[in-house]
Every structure is written in structure tokens, then in C-alpha cells.
Image (cartoon, rainbow, N blue to C red):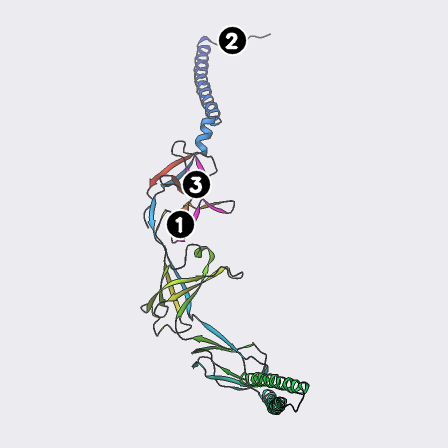
Amino acid sequence: MAVISFPGTIRGEWGRVAMQRAARTGKYLILGAFAGLATCIQILSAGSPAHADSLNVVPVAVREAKLVDYQPKLTLSGAVAARSLVNVSFRVNGQVVERLVDIGQHVEKGQLLARIDDVEQRANMRVAQASMDAAEAQLVQADANFKRQQALLKQGFTTRSQYDQADQALRTAQSALSSAQSQLGNARDELSYTELHAPVSGVVTARNIETGQVVQAAQTAFSIAEDGSRDAIFDVQETLVNHARIGMGVTVALLADPSIEAEGNIRELSPVVDAQTGTVRVKVGIAQATAQMALGAIVTGTVHMDARQVIVLPWSAMTSEAGRTAVWRVDRDTHVATLVPIKVLAYEKERVIVESGLNEGELIVTKGAQMLRSGEPIEIMQGPEGAGSQ
């Protein structure tokens, strides 16, 4: 076997190069090992509880709840109406033969409004009159016979039995006349009922009959707004009515000209909520309605409610819990957020008036509430700021 040998100089050069390469390779291996170790430490640290808690902390802005004086002014729109509205109707059935007034016309008390056919009533009155005339004639005859029997009895020319019969006939004739007079009175009343007269002075606001129409007794023919006091009628949402009360002051102004106004007071709150609109009717008595506040005029009513202390929060603080309005309250010591239901007095532009559910000095989340869950820690990025004033 042949043996190949290298000169000493070549062998030495190759050895030096090999040693240099080995040194560089070792350096790289050490650096790589340190890098890998650092990566492992970071991975392990990321899985630790302390790091996880820092990732779950939600940054929020809070506001300190403060009680402020608040006097709400509720402005509504409605219409002027008569305080007393009288419905007028015929008291007997019949066909309308004459209608003398129309909607918007002013009538005086006792004025004739309409008339129905009175042929039947006049015939009944003639019969009743004839019956009374006959009863009067019978009474005259019975009275004369009684007086004759009375005189004869004193002279002894008649019997007691005949006298008693004459007395009984007289009493019967008197009763018959009384009955006939009553029937005649009823017939006259029936005839008078064929004419419809205004029971009060006022403006006709409704007409429900026409000439030639057959009407029934008690069917409303006209509605009359009686002269005198005026009311402003408002239909108010049920939630707003809860803060109103009888006697509360209201400023009533014409919608077309707000400079024309009058003072009034709430005099009636309907106990019934309209099923279709969800509103409650409120009647405001106008103390001295101006001439411009005619029936049907559109008006606004500003209700001056009682002053109270409330907490004012921005809209951004609002959330809900089980269908109820709520806010997030932050514990000052643990910085843990808790959902708290509140009662809202009013919703206004850019702010909400809180009536109850919070105490002064509590921290309320105003920004970042959408990211919170109950019991989570938070990080206060802004606050606490004051609640401001009305």
C-alpha cells in the first residue's frame, strides 16, 4: 500500500486554519445557546399569572359622582280647549226638519238649534186636551149632583146611600181630571222636546245631525264649548307624568307667537294610560287666557318642577343589566369594577340625570365601559373628574 506524505510546512498551515475555524464555530454556538435560553425565559414569563393579570387590566376614564341642584323644566305641546264641553241631544225620536246652527258659530243660552217633525206630538197633545176637557165636564156634573144630594139629605128627601154614591162619583171625577191634566202636561213636554235649545252660551264645536236625518233620543246632536274658563290639554309620556303633581305651575305660550303667554296650574292628571300611545292626558287650567288663545290654538306648556339633588353623568357612562339602565362603579382600593343599576330622572343632550342608585363620591366609569366585565380590575387612565353642575 502506498503511503502519501505531505511536507511539514503544508501540514502546519492546514492545522492553523482548522483551529481558527473551530474557534469561530464555538463562539457562534455559545451565542446561539444564550439566545435560545433568553427566548425560553420570555416564553415562560408570558405564561406566568402576573403577566396574564397585566394583560387583563382594562384602561378606563372615571368620574367622581357629585350631588348637584337640578330643577327640570318639561316643555310640552298641546291645544286650548274649553273647560266645560256640553253635548246636546234631543229627548225624543224623530226626523230633523230644521238645523239652524253650524260648527264654529257662537250661540246664546236658550237659542234654538234644531227642530224635528212634531206631527205625532201635536196629535198626542190634542188627544190629551180633549181628554182633559171631558174630565172637566164630568167633574162639573159630578159636583152639581153631589151638592144636590147634600141639600136633599139635610131636608130628608134622599137616602144616605144615594148621598154616598154622589160623593164617590165626585171623587172619581176629580181623580180623572187630575190624570187628564197630567197627560196633557206630558204631551206638551213631548211637543217641546221636538225643539233643541242651547243649554249654555258658547261655541259649537261639533255637529252630528243633518236635515232629513232620523235621530234617536239621547243621540248627540251638537257639542258646545261653554264660555268661560279655558284649559290647555297635553298628552304626556307616562315616565314624565310621574314627576308632575296637581297644582304645579305651568307657563302656557302660543306656538305661533311665544311672546303671548299665560300662567296656569295642573288641575287634572288622568289616571288612565292610553293603550295605543302610552301617554297620559294632563289638563292645565289657564288663569287668564288671552283673546289670541282661542279654542283649538296650539300652545306649548313649560312645567316648572320642584328642585332636587341629582347626579349628572355623560351618556358614555350608560350601559344595561337585565334590561335596566346601569353604570360601572369602581372600588377606590381594589380598582375592581362592579355593575350597578340606577334610576334615571331624565335624558338630556349629552348627559343623563340620575335620580337614585349612586352615592356622592363614588367613582363611575365614563369611558371604556364597553370592555368591562364584572369583577375585573381596571386601570384609571383619566380622573377622577367632577360631575359638573346643572
Classify residue 383 by image quadrant: top left
Tell me: 292 left or right of 149: left
Question: Which residue carries the number 2 mark?
Answer: 5
> Which secondary structure lies at badge 1?
strand
Extent of the magenta region: 323-349
Q: Which mark is residue 216?
A: none
Q: Residues within 10 Å of mark 3 (few under 14, many from 20)?
A: many
Question: Which residue carries the number 3 mark?
Answer: 328
Residue 201, placed above or below residue 281: below
Mark positioned earlier in the residue sequence (3 or 2): 2
**Which residue is at 43% across, 49% downward?**
344
Q: Position of residue 116 (x, y in %)?
A: 56, 85
Mark positioned earlier in the residue sequence (1 or 3): 3
Nearest the viewer among 128 and 19 is 128
> Which secondary structure lies at badge 2?
loop
Mark positioned earlier in the residue sequence (2 or 1): 2
Residues under numbered marks 2 and 1 in contact, where contact means CB atoms less than 8 Å apart: no
Nearest the viewer among 44 and 78 is 78
- Could you tell me how far apart the alpha carbons at marks 2 and 1 are, in whole angstroms? 100 Å
Residue 98, placed above or below residue 385: below
The dominant secondary structure in magenta is: strand
Classify residue 217 by image quadrant: bottom right
Question: Which residue carries the number 1 mark?
Answer: 352
Nearest the viewer among 226 and 39 is 226
Amino acid under label 1?
Val
